[in-house]
Amino acid sequence: MASIRKRGDLQWEARVRRRGQPIQCKTFTTKARAEAWVRQVEGEMDRGVFVSRAEAESTTLAEALDRYAKEITPTKKPSTAKRERDRIKNLAELAIACRPLAAIRGADVAAFIRARQSEGLGGNTIRLDLALLSHLFNTARTAWGMESLSNPVDLVKGQRPKLPAGRDRRLVGDEETRLRAAAQAYDRVAPPGAGTIEALIIWAIETAMRRGEMAAMRWEHLDRTARTLLIPDTKTGVPRTIPLSPAALKTIEGLSPKARGLVWNRSPDAISRAFMEVCKAAGIRGLTFHDLRHEATSRLFEKHGFSALEAAAVTGHKTMQMLKRYTHLRAEDLAKRMR
């Protein structure tokens, strides 16, 4: 049984009662909308497909983001969780966050994308925003009891911003020599015990390790006999053991090896700061510490002749597409291998 009653001058309250179903009640600004809602709810109840929209209609995006931050974000890696909390805080301050989840449509997400672009945000930042929103809607539907929700982010796949081309910066000319010379000068005046920046540069080129992996590197994970290093905590969440070249082992032996503890005693940010100072002193522009991972990945093919699967086992890339983004082979080097 359904009823519609007028409340004041601009409100109409619609109520649906059915045996075996919770009472459904909603207020509208016109009687026509109230009647249309009643027909929809009763029709779904008749077909046995009715799912209450009450929670989705009363929960704002800001409230859902807060719940997500409390329940979902803490399950992720600390570094990832920190970045996600910052992202959630920024999203919660936007106008769309005041809207109920059930009221957010594909058009609203498209408007959100345009607004973020007008703010000057890059394509990758917007892509990560959309990934978070998409997972939030899916979580609300599958784990928070809001089965009536659809995911509006799925409706704008063709309107998502294009990602910038991946970096292809490598060491060129005598840059490696200049870089190491500047690093040696930097190390002579650096405080002791932090691990030399020159050794870090050599290690990065020889191992293709990520900056965070290097900062977390421990002596007890090094097997000098087998010439391997265990990396238990990776960006992809999958531990891996990498082979070590003679140059890598020589570098590490020069650091006064210990039985346990951190190898470098530098945070990821400290590594980047030191590297930027070294690049400036060497007169090298446009090179980041992460570019050394691109350099190292490319050398696995050029210098060591690794196959794609062998290289991926070293770098930790989960897909060949990601491995390709980090591989920038020089035509002149390939030409030397041709007979």
Image (cartoon, rainbow, N blue to C red):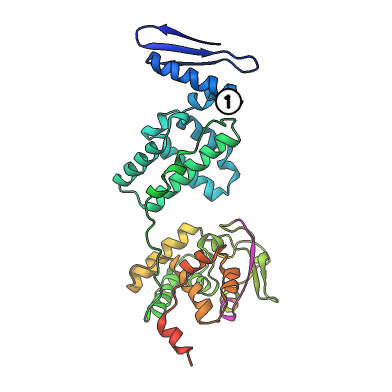
Question: In this picture, which residue range is highlighted in magenta?
Answer: 237-248
Q: Residue at x 37, y 69 (%)?
A: 279
Report whether 86 appears left or right of 214.
Answer: left
Q: Quick one: which residue is furthest to the left in this view?
A: 118
Q: Quadrant of residue 171?
A: bottom left
Report the number of discs: 1
The amino acid type of the residue labelled 1 equals Phe
Q: Quick one: which residue is furthest to the right in this view?
A: 225
Of residues 2 and 248, the one nearer the viewer is: 2
Report whether 164 appears left or right of 264.
Answer: left
Examine the rendered structure and indicate whether residue 94 appears above or below residue 156.
above
Magenta span contains residue 29: no
| Residue that label 1 marks | 50
Examine the rendered structure and indicate whether residue 65 appears above or below residue 214.
above
Bin the neighbour count of mark 1 within 10 Å (Cα to Cα): few under 14, some 14-19, many 20 and up.
some
Examine the rendered structure and indicate whether residue 174 appears above or below residue 169.
below
Give x and y (percent) for residue 281.
34, 71
Magenta span contains residue 243: yes
Q: Quadrant of the N terminus?
A: top right
Give x and y (percent) for residue 237.
61, 56
Q: Residue at x 38, y 66 (%)?
A: 277
Give x and y (percent) for residue 209.
54, 67
Give x and y (percent) for residue 108.
38, 36
Asked whether the viewer can see residue 85, the reply is no
Of residues 329 and 247, the one nearer the viewer is: 329
Report whether 64 appears left or right of 145.
Answer: left
